[in-house]
Every structure is written in C-alpha cells, then in structure tokens.
Amino acid sequence: MKTAAVNRAADICDLAPGYIRAIAPYEPGKPISELAREFGLDPNGIIKLASNENPLGVSPLAMQAMRQALADVARYPDGNGFELKQALSQHYGVETSQIVLGNGSNDVLELAARSFLTPGLEAIYSQHAFAVYPLATQAVGATGVEVPAHDFAHDLGAMLRAVSPRTRLMFIANPNNPTGTLIHSADLHAFIRALPPDVIVVLDEAYNEYLPAELKADSVGWLREFPNLIITRTFSKAYGLAGLRVGYAFAHAGVADLMNRVRQPFNVNSISLAAATAGLDDREFVRHSFELNQSGMRRITQGLTQLGLTYIPSFGNFVSFKVGDANAVFQQLLKRGVIVRPIASYGMPDYLRVSTGLEAENERFLEALGQSLSA
Ligand SMILES: *Cc1c(COP(=O)(O)O)cnc(C)c1O
C-alpha cells in the first residue's frame, strides 16, 4: 500500500497528456458584472462592446418561444432537434440529414476536430484567426499549423502550400474574427477546389448574416460539389442568442452523421432549440441587426479616423483598430465603463477590437476613446 502511494505522480495533473496541459485557455470578453465589481461601477452605466453580441438583444419571437418552452424543462430536449432542423432545412435548402446542431458553433467546431483529427494529424488555420481552432485541435492531441496572414487576411496560397500528407482539417473564418477580413467568393471556391479531397474545409461563417447579399458566397450550394466541406453558422451573433449557445453545421450527410455520433445526445437544450427555431424566421429582426451594424460600422470607423487611428476594414459586426499601448487604452476605457476586447492573444498587441453597438453606445465609446487616448 505504502509503496503504491509513493509511486503516485507527484502532481496529479502530470497524468494528463502534455497536449492538454499545454492548452492556453480562451480569454473571453470581460463580463459587465465583473467590471462593476472590480471598479465599483454601476452595472447599468457600463457598456460592453467586447464580444460581438447583438446590441438589439433578443428577437421578440424568440423570447415568446422561450417563455412557452419553459413549461417543459422537466423533459429532456429533442436530441435530434427535429423542429430546428426542419426550419434550417427549409430556410437554406439542405437536407435535415446534412445538419449538425451544437451548443454554440464552438461545439460544432470541436465536433469536426473530434470526428477527423487524431494525434499525428494536422489542422491548418491562419495567423490572427479565431482562437477556437487551435484549442479544438490541441484538445484532441493533433498538431495545429498556423500560416502567417497577409495584411491580416488569410493567405490562401500559403495555406494551400502548407498542406501535407498529415493535414486533415483546414479552418477558414469568413469573415474572420478578430480581423474582420473577407475572402471573396470566387477565391474561396477556387481554393477549396484546389485542395486535396482528403482535406476537410471547416468554413466558419459566424458573421454571414452581416454580409450584404452581393458579398455572400453560395457556400451552401458548394456542398453539392465538395463532400469535404463543413459550413458552420451560429445564432450567437445576428440572431442575438449568444447566451443560449446554439450553432450548427451543414455538411455532406455522411460527415454530418459522423459528427452527430460524436456529440452529446442532448447537446442543445430545449429553451435554446425553441428560441433558435422561432428566431430563424424573424426576418425583421435580422434585417434590423444588419442595418444597425452597417450604420454603426460607418459611425465607428469615421470616429476612429477622426481620432487619427487606423483600423482594419471589417465585414463583421466589430472592427479592430490600432492604438500603440492597447492595454493602457483598454484600462482607461474600463475606468470609463466601456468594455472592448484586447487581442494580444491573437498576436495583435497594438490593437483593440470593438463591436458595433446601439447608436448611443457607439457615441459613448468614441467619446471615451478620445478621452482615453489623451489620458
Ligand atoms: C463568435 C464566433 C463564433 C460563434 O461562437 P458560438 O460558439 O456560436 O457562440 C464562431 N466563429 C467565429 C469566428 C466567431 O467570431
């Protein structure tokens, strides 16, 4: 007995694989409640433009559906998400067998990694791309290959050249977060066509609803052409349901089936299923979100220019701008009750990212930023 105890690992955590111990945790935007506690501020006076959330809140149709769903929470959710899949199928013209639902699109990104990666295989993603790609890759012990960006955008040529016999996944964020860059449809299509068929493209379109129609790729149509394409989308951004955690993937039916086997049986809860199903058909809400973002983006970028700052033109509901000592400016903004997002962990230590807000929030942000720069 005694010997066994002595032989035990000195640190129980050493029992976890090295690739798990090496994971650098995701750094979320600072919650309003946390800033209120830390600085003794009134939470009602704080504005959060840090997580690309929808400043309009929740669609009234989704709200009503959630209220109704509350009565049934004693029951397990529909593990197959029948109604939401029906709604998505009608909305986008895909078969329900091609749909995977997730606890946020984050979940779906992980399902792709868990379905196709093992230690020894590689996933490729761009420098300055969404932080979940390296996390999902590392969590399954596969190797992440980060390809240097070109002017903050995905360098598709370099990404193609990075493909090796061990490459199994290629993550593409379009538009990308936190840079907001967009790959044009024809370039993206040519890129996917040029990839070996045994490399699966995970095309993350979390900000798709913020694109004007003429800039949207027909990515869903491409599924007929490319069995190695997985498209991920979310209800967290334009649909205003970030707290509920609902995302989905469209893929070849066989691929969707694999991902569905890997997921938790009840990975999307019943309130979220109800809200997303109702929210999907609230065209008015999505249109309003789109328009508010268009005008907010114009106002914020104009304000940044007036302050003498440069920014990366963005196709999302956020924009990253350059401010020398980003952490100092971030702290100054916090003091003034404005939360934005430092993106040093994305290899952009001189930049801050701000999400578009309501008109009054954008004004307050610009005013606080002006004061913070001269503080
Ligand atoms: C916000 C975001 C997501 C969506 O995350 P959810 O898990 O669906 O809330 C996915 N990809 C990118 C690039 C994002 O910025």
Image: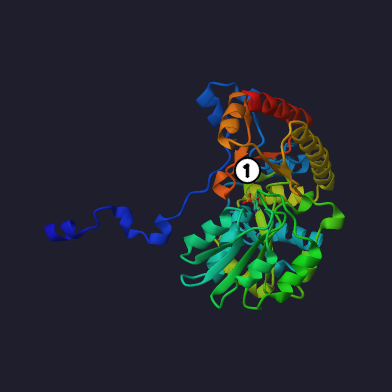
Q: x and y percent of residue 222 in the render?
A: 77, 70
* Near-viewer residue (21 or 244): 21
Q: x and y percent of residue 37 in the render?
A: 52, 26
Amino acid beneath label 1: Gly
Q: Let me know if residue 230 appears in the view.
A: no
* Near-viewer residue (217 or 332): 332
Looking at the image, the residue that sits furthest to the left is: 2
* Near-viewer residue (58 or 108): 108
Compared with 62, 205 (above or below) is below
Q: Residue at x 63, y 46 (%)?
A: 244
Compared with 165, 321 (above or below) is above
- Left/right placement of residue 342 relative to residue 19 reads right
Image quarter hosting the C terminus: top right
Instruction: Confirm or reject: label 1 Cβ below 8 Å from ligand 1.
Output: no
- Left/right placement of residue 135 relative to residue 216 reads left
**Would you name the residue on which mark 1 appears?**
243
Q: x and y percent of residue 182 in the render?
A: 75, 56
- Left/right placement of residue 123 relative to residue 366 reads left
- Left/right placement of residue 166 relative to residue 280 reads left
Compared with 311, 34 (above or below) is above
* Near-viewer residue (264 or 41): 41
